[in-house]
Image (cartoon, rainbow, N blue to C red):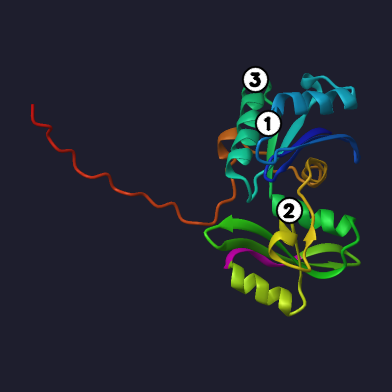
């Protein structure tokens, strides 16, 4: 199956084409502050490298975070529009699972945790273990405080993620990559309608009631 993978959840945003068990093209762009991302150009570049036309893509796999909410929304919107226009299959893939799988591919062994800045002094954290059978999740994704994550590192846990070294002295930088998102999607068949794909966001949505309107004297 020809899969277009997209992951815009970190500062390294990427598009990749996966074709029959192998990533045949991978394009990446750094969107650090002050730099612009042109998502359509990124996708077209990946397709060009793979020597494929848009119409040949059979599935789009989107990294749904957690991470940059704005970036994830852009990727989801692109996928939704593509499905409306062509009927292509869609899958949402956890960017954290992608990072964990990438860690295994990069040779990280034993126990480790993926940590992603959730702002407000909190982190998204999920724990994994690499064994002879591959990478296995041991603790599901949750919100934790910076202090709790730092305590985990002091206890000997390796913390990885797109900004790991910023917060954790012994952390390891590993970014989510579209090629791994596409590879994980190739193992699944639970395709969804575009409107069903949402960013991973563990906080409860809060609404602030607007004050009652007041008459303005004339």
* Cα–Cα gap, marks 1 and 2: 19 Å
Distance from the alpha carbon under mark 3 to that under mark 2: 33 Å
Residue 60 picture quarter: top right
Residue 42 spot, x, y in % from top left? 76, 28
Along the polypeptide, which appears first: circle 1 or circle 2? 1
Q: Is residue 49 left or right of residue 28?
A: right
Q: Verify CB contact (< 8 Å) between mark 1 and mark 2.
A: no
Q: Position of residue 140 (x, y in %)?
A: 65, 64
Label 2 element class: loop
Q: Give the residue pinned by disc 1.
A: 36
CA neighbours of label 2 inside 10 A, class few (<14), some (14 to 19), many (20+): many
- Residue at 62% in and 25% down: 81
Question: Which numbered disc flags the more N-terminal residue, 3 or 1?
Answer: 1
Residue sitting farthest toward the left: 218
Residue 143 sits inside the magenta stretch: yes
**Percent position of residue 147, x then y:** 60, 72
For image coordinates 79% across by 26% down, the residue present is 57
Q: Is residue 70 magenta?
A: no
Which segment did they paint magenta?
137-144
* Magenta stretch prevailing secondary structure: strand
Which of these two is toward me, 16 or 210? 210
Which residue is outermost to the bottom?
Answer: 155
Q: Are marks 3 and 2 in contact (CB under 8 Å)?
A: no
Distance from Cα at disc 3 to Cα at disc 1: 26 Å
Labels 1, 2: front one: 1
Measuring 57% from the left and 63% from the top, which residue is drawn there? 122
Q: Which residue is mark 3?
A: 85
Query: For mark 2, what is the residue?
Result: 162
161 vs 43: above or below:
below
């Amino acid at each position: 199956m020809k899969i277009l993978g997209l992951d815009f959840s970190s500062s390294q945003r990427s598009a990749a084409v996966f074709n029959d068990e192998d990533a045949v093209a991978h394009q990446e762009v750094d969107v650090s502050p002050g730099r612009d991302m042109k998502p359509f150009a990124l996708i077209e570049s990946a397709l060009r490298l793979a020597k494929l036309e848009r119409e040949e893509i059979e599935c789009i796999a989107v990294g749904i975070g957690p991470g940059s909410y704005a970036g994830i929304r852009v990727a989801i919107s692109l996928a939704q529009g593509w499905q409306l226009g062509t009927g292509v299959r869609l899958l949402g893939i956890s960017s954290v699972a992608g990072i964990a799988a990438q860690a295994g591919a990069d040779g990280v062994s034993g126990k480790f945790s993926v940590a992603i800045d959730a702002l407000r002094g909190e982190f998204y954290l999920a724990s994994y273990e690499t064994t002879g059978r591959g990478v296995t999740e041991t603790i599901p994704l949750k919100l934790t405080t910076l202090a709790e994550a730092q305590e985990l590192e002091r206890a000997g846990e390796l913390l990885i993620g797109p900004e790991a070294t910023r917060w954790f002295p012994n952390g390891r930088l590993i970014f989510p990559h579209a090629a791994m998102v596409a590879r994980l999607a190739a193992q699944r068949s639970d395709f969804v309608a575009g409107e069903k794909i949402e960013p991973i966001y563990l906080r409860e949505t809060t609404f602030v009631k607007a004050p009652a309107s007041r008459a303005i004297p004339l």
